[in-house]
Image: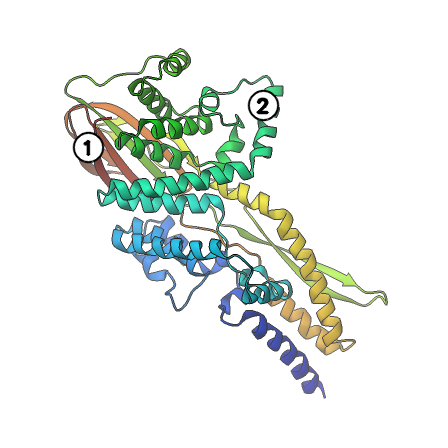
């Protein structure tokens, strides 16, 4: 009799699980993404890029779906200097995002999966990447094109990235304007970048929703192509986000001078001082430096008793994603020809990720409440007053209640910029004791890109010509 009762409850649960999750990874039933991705993330954070490549899921294994799996693969292959593989993986993600965004109606399979998520967990739903991750997708596709000396291809990606940035700002305009109003009430005047670009002066709030790294790189590529109007727009937007970044200030002033924006140049000069010009036998070095790895979401759990009108109850396990207080990894300063460089903040990816979770939390909490109700109704209709059946349901609930910790976890934690005017000739950039040599040409600009994790560094440079 006891075996028959256990069998009955188990069959009911198994049938429901298989119906809701057909074609989806069983790992997502009993484990969340941060746990599944631990080996990859730890390998990247310690600079073991080849180990991270080996630990990535294959297409057949599909850990988090085509979009997120290939975000991770594209990033890891980039760090491993496997550029064709990196570009190919990002292109798979890009196509999958297009398919997702082109869906005019919710498909039947999506509806079934969503219903199943109410009874199981949100990990079985299709992953929809947030705007900041889509921005990085186009940024890294753009960098892949830069690495292969294809400026036209890179410009296509920064244009697409700009559309993502604009959509993100528009979606949050109300919050940004509210933050701007609060700053004004505190007696803080708008920064000059926000005035020139007509962006809200929202302080750190703007850094959380607009990627200064992307805006600065976009401006740099437009300037390289001699599209000074587009370069000026993106540089001023970057200045609105990062008013304290001297490299961004210099870029805005440089393009304002080149494009004859005398009134803007006068205002900028008054605010920041004169812009240094290249002299004969000098060139400019611009360094983009990624540091560390973004924090992953963790699992917060709570056991909650749910009572019915007769006083009977069941224990439900609640599980929510959260970002624990993190301590940023400290990196030694970059050293250029024996002189330490002071990095200027371009992007705090941890801030962007945390902001995204904060925005998602109301809907996460709503779905969690609906899930508790759905599970309790399912338990009552299937197990009824059967103690053994209730026990099986409680065990199943505890095992399958997993937080949705899916996010792009191999992104950098911070991104800095540095720039110098240097004499023509060979120069040495020292990174964690490793020397990298590049050439500065007369009155031209060289871009040095690097990403540091653990004691390892991926580094390359490109000549951008006269800016």
Nearest-to-viewer mark from 1 and 2: 2
In front: 213, or 156? 156
- Determine whether 144 is above or below 269 in the image: below
Q: Residue 182, image x and y in percent?
A: 61, 25
Q: Quadrant of the N terminus?
A: bottom right
Q: Quadrant of the C terminus?
A: top left
Residue 173 in sight: yes
**At 36% from the left edge and 37% from the top edge, which residue is drawn?**
331
According to the image, label 2 marks what residue? 183
In the figure, is residue 256 to the left or right of 17? Answer: left
Question: x%, y% of residue 2?
Answer: 71, 85
Q: Identify the residue at image location x=40%, y=44%.
A: 136
Residue 100 sits above or below residue 194 on the image: below
Name the colour scheme.
rainbow
Q: Earlier in the sequence, mark 1 or mark 2?
A: 2
Disc 1 vs disc 2: Cβ atoms closer than 8 Å?
no
Badge 2 crowding class, 10 Å Cα cut-off, few under 14, some 14 to 19, many 20 or more, is some
Q: Quadrant of residue 286?
A: top left
SS of the residue under disc 2: helix
Task: Please give left or right for residue 175 compared with residue 454 in the image.
Answer: right
Name the residue rendered at 70%, 64% in the picture. Answer: 374
Q: Can see residue 294?
A: no
Residue receiving disc 1: 428
Instruction: Give the residue displayed 41% in from the left and 67% down from the top.
Output: 61
Q: Position of residue 130 (x, y in %)?
A: 49, 47
Spatial CA span between label 1 and label 2: 43 Å
How many neighbours does mark 1 have within 10 angstroms: few (below 14), some (14-19), or many (20 or more)? some
**Circle 1 sits in a helix, a strand or a loop, which is it?**
strand
């Amino acid at each position: 009799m006891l075996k028959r009762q256990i069998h009955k409850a188990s069959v009911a649960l198994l049938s429901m699980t298989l119906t809701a999750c057909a074609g989806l990874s069983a790992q997502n039933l009993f484990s969340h993404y941060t746990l599944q991705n631990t080996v990859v993330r730890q390998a990247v954070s310690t600079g073991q890029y080849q180990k991270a490549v080996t630990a990535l899921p294959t297409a057949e294994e599909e850990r988090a779906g085509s979009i997120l799996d290939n975000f991770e693969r594209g990033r890891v292959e980039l760090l491993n200097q496997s550029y064709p593989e990196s570009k190919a993986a990002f292109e798979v993600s890009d196509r999958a995002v297009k398919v997702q965004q082109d869906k005019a109606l919710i498909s039947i399979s999506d509806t079934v999966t969503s219903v199943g998520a109410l009874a199981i967990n949100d990990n079985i739903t299709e992953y929809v990447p947030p705007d900041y991750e889509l921005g990085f997708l186009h940024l890294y596709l753009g960098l892949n094109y830069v690495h292969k000396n294809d400026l036209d291809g890179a410009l296509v990606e920064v244009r697409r990235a700009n559309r993502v940035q604009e959509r993100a700002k528009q979606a949050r305009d109300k919050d940004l304007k509210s933050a701007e109003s609060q700053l004004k009430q505190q007696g803080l005047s708008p920064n000059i970048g926000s005035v020139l670009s007509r962006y809200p002066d929202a302080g750190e709030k703007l850094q959380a929703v607009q990627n200064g790294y992307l805006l600065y790189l976009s401006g740099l590529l437009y300037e390289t192509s001699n599209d000074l109007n587009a370069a000026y727009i993106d540089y001023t937007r970057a200045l609105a986000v990062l008013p304290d970044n001297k490299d961004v200030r210099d870029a805005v002033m440089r393009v304002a001078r080149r494009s004859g924006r005398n009134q803007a140049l006068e205002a900028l000069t008054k605010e920041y001082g004169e812009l240094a010009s290249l002299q004969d036998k000098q060139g400019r070095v611009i360094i983009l430096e990624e540091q560390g790895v973004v924090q992953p979401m963790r699992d917060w759990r709570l056991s909650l008793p749910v009572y019915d009108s007769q006083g009977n109850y069941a224990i439900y396990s609640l599980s929510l994603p959260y970002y624990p207080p993190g301590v940023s990894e400290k990196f030694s300063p970059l050293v250029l020809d024996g002189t330490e460089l002071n990095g200027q903040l371009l992007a705090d990816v941890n801030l962007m990720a945390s902001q995204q979770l904060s925005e998602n939390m109301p809907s996460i909490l709503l779905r969690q409440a609906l899930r508790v109700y759905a599970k309790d109704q399912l338990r009552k209709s299937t197990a009824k007053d059967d103690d053994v059946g209730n026990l099986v349901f409680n065990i199943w609930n505890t095992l399958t209640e997993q937080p949705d910790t899916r996010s792009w976890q191999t992104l950098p934690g911070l991104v800095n910029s540095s720039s110098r005017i240097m004499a023509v000739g060979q120069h040495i950039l020292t990174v964690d004791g490793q020397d990298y040599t590049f050439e500065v040409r007369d009155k031209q600009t060289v871009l040095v890109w690097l990403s540091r994790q653990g004691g390892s560094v991926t580094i390359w440079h490109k000549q951008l010509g006269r800016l």
